[in-house]
Image: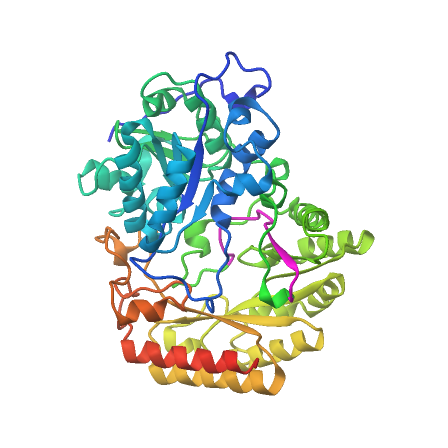
Amino acid sequence: MPSHNRKGVSLSERSYEAQDAAPHLQIRAIAISAPECISGYKSGRALNSTDPVSLFNACRCAASLAQRRKGAWANSNWGQPQKKLRENFLLMYSLDDMHRLENLIQASRPNILFIGAMTLCMPGAVKCAKLARKIFGDRLLIILGGRHINETIYLADERKRSPSLVKHHRASPGRLIREHEIPPLFDVIISGEAEKLIAEIGELFSRSQQSPATFIAETLDTKTEGRWIADFPRIDYTLVSDGIPLKHDELPSVVGTFGITASFDVFQGCMTSHIFSDTGPGCIYDCTFCSERRSIAGNIQEIQGAPRRLYNQLKETVCTVKQDHPKKRASAFVEDSIFLSGSPVAITQLCQLLEKAPLEIIFGGQFTIDQILRKKDLIQRLAKCGLRYIFIGLETLEPEEIGGLSKDVDSKKQTWKDRFLQALDFMAANHIDCGCALLFGLGEAHTSRRNLLNGLIALKRETGQPRTLSANWAVQHPLRSCRESENENYLRWGTPEGQLLEYFHRFGEASLEYPLPNTSKPQVGEVKEIIQLLNEFEATDD
């Protein structure tokens, strides 16, 4: 695969208010989150966001430029009030949503289509791109990104930033196009940090005459901030950034750019924002079943400014809710895999900011069981500042049955179950609601699943906690150089039509086709029983 590197004059280094020439093309962009299922609709009982948060994050710099009337994005269809801006973004779930995409395409007449895809969404991404190509042909620039791309197009060593060192997993869309396993649907495939890159691509697109992808490939500067790879499979061309770090303190927030429309049930009617400390792309732990684990996603970054970033977003949330939803109260959920990466120093600094200038907001975030028990003083301090909800990954009550958990750091002191119960009591004593993520398909016996759910049902009846459960069935992801996935192209739907698909609409992530290695595939009868127990858990609210 030919690959290239180039140094040039980055548009991001110039003032967007004084470009060399007026844009030739008006940007008309839409962004979609590709569907993960072949048919059906997500159950209202599944714990899922209604916002395409990952798309918002990736596109926030471009959208902010549009709203601030900067550069080529100023004249785009994104230069609109937040409510109208959101109409250009679509969160899809299954192919039953294709009519929504077709309606959006016909109404917007886009010349740029951004597609975000998780691993189970790749068949859907291909379907969406085919539909767009059928309508617009090569007049449309199609850009693909998302976690699946991050896991399939990568550098083995981030310090060695040469295009010749880019690796392509068997499931890399760039490789699949070159090997003619899928049509040449995607013009640009982005792996890595895309915030500045997306904004830059739009600027270059507006100045292209013919063949925008070729012009972008030949003009895009590798000094554009962020650690990214831009693959151009239709012209067999690859660029790798110089790795200049993003300045997260200077990036616009999702709240300020896209506003707030969500309301999490656990916050009892409050409007809920999604906020980010931007301390890293994944988790600080390394559990083998998790696609966000440290060895795959990467390490902590820019922790120093993280408390101030979170505080500012909490403040933005309060202001936005007062302006757009004056009869509602404000809440926020911190989308970090671990709240402020679990840093005691960073959490203390956030508490200091909230204590010095209190905000009328309640919020939630994710901690591990052992972090809660080890940081009781900090959790109590956060609770006094508005922490009302903690979401924990419980997975199982018997870690030894599934080969252990990286985050099970205090296993020699007490059992996982005993520490969970202790953490639950501590949260309840501090008026903090608890939500739990359950993960099946890790190699556990079905009796263990029943015991887990029956135990949680009994707990909720006795104590009212945990408040919510999120059920998932473990999926084997590409995970870059993962041996178990090395021959899989992920072009099959995760679960085919049938009864099991209907049941999986109740789950967060789940798949029949891609179980973890050395585990049995999910069985219809077992999944049905799990759903019956989940229903029983929820019925305790009645």
Q: How is the image coloured?
A: rainbow
Outermost residue on the top side: it is: 20
Q: Residue at x 66, y 44 (%)?
A: 305
Q: Quadrant for residue 526, please give it.
A: bottom left
Quadrant where the C terminus is found in the figure? bottom right
| Number of numbered markers | 0
Q: Residue at x 27, y 76 (%)?
A: 523
Q: Could one spot residue 475 in this view of the protein?
A: yes
* Vertical side of 278 occupied by 218: above or below: above
Q: Quadrant for residue 383, please give it.
A: bottom right
Q: Main secondary structure of the magenta part?
A: loop
Percent of width and height locating residue 478: 31, 53
Q: Residue at x 53, y 87 (%)?
A: 458
Outermost residue on the right side: it is: 356
Determine whether, in the image, residue 276 is placed left or right of residue 109. Answer: right
Q: Could one spot residue 415 in this view of the protein?
A: no
Q: Residue at x 81, y 51 (%)?
A: 357
* Vertical side of 75 occupied by 87: above or below: below
> Which is more toward the observer, 260 or 118?
260
Quadrant where the N terminus is found in the figure? top left
Percent of width and height locating residue 436: 52, 71
Percent of width and height locating residue 295: 43, 53
Outermost residue on the left side: it is: 180
Determine whether, in the image, residue 383 is placed left or right of residue 146. Answer: right
Magenta segment range? 268-284
* Vertical side of 472 occupied by 491: above or below: above
Q: Quadrant for residue 465, please give it.
A: bottom right
Q: Is residue 519 magenta?
A: no
